[in-house]
Amino acid sequence: MTQRMDLGKLAPEAYRAMAGLEKYIAASGLPKPLLELVRLRASQINGCAYCVDMHSRDAKEGGESDARINAVAVWQEAPCFTEAERAALALTEAGTRLSTGSVSDEVWARAAKVFFEADLAALVVQITTINAWNRIGVITHMTPESFK
């Protein structure tokens, strides 16, 4: 696939706004490894090759094992994730798949049980933000860095 456009060059104000969300998330106190798992799972669901490539690499550089990175796609069956990671991944899946359902009270309660309210708010912003990035990547056919 050929990249259709460079949205960063054509809409720099939009990119700065997205970067502002990322800055908020980075300052939230949520662990970076958890954020990378969330970013990777949403990107897998959305089929964003650019973001799957980026967040797999970022997770690896952050110390994640290949086994855990590979297991994100099957996290429900993999024993290597903590209760907080499982709650975040469940919320990520539900929040990413809104076209086929809603975020159930059970999924919300699971996340609310393991995250302080401010952290849960940051997690919701992260899930929202990565879904927006995925849509930019998929619509414009962003080329993964590893493939260049």
Image (cartoon, helix red, strand yellow):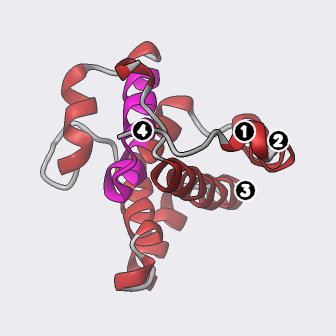
- The label nearer to you, 2 versus 3, is 2
Image quadrant where residue 30 sits: top right
In three-dimensional space, the C-alpha distance between marks 2 and 4, rounded to whole angstroms, equals 21 Å
Please give the residue where the numbered disc 2 appears in the rendered image.
12
Q: Secondary structure at mark 2?
A: helix
State the image coordinates of residue 137 (x, y, percent, origin top left): 51, 47
The answer to whether the residue labelled 2 contacts the one labelled 4, judged by CB atoms less than 8 Å apart, is no
Please give the residue where the numbered disc 3 appears in the rendered image.
118
Q: Residue at x 37, y 85 (%)?
A: 101
First-in-chain label (4 vs 1): 4
- The label nearer to you, 2 versus 4, is 4
Q: Residues within 10 Å of mark 4 (few under 14, many from 20)?
A: few
The answer to whether the residue labelled 2 contacts the one labelled 1, judged by CB atoms less than 8 Å apart, is yes
How many numbered discs sit on the rendered protein? 4
Query: Viewed as shown, does residue 36 lie left or right of 132?
Result: left
Please give the residue where the numbered disc 4 appears in the rendered image.
2
> Is residue 28 depicted above or below 102 in this figure?
above
First-in-chain label (3 vs 1): 1
Task: Give amino acid for label 4.
Answer: Thr
Please give the residue where the numbered disc 1 appears in the rendered image.
8
Q: Which residues are magenta?
A: 40-59
Q: Secondary structure at mark 1?
A: helix
Quadrant location, the C terminus = top left
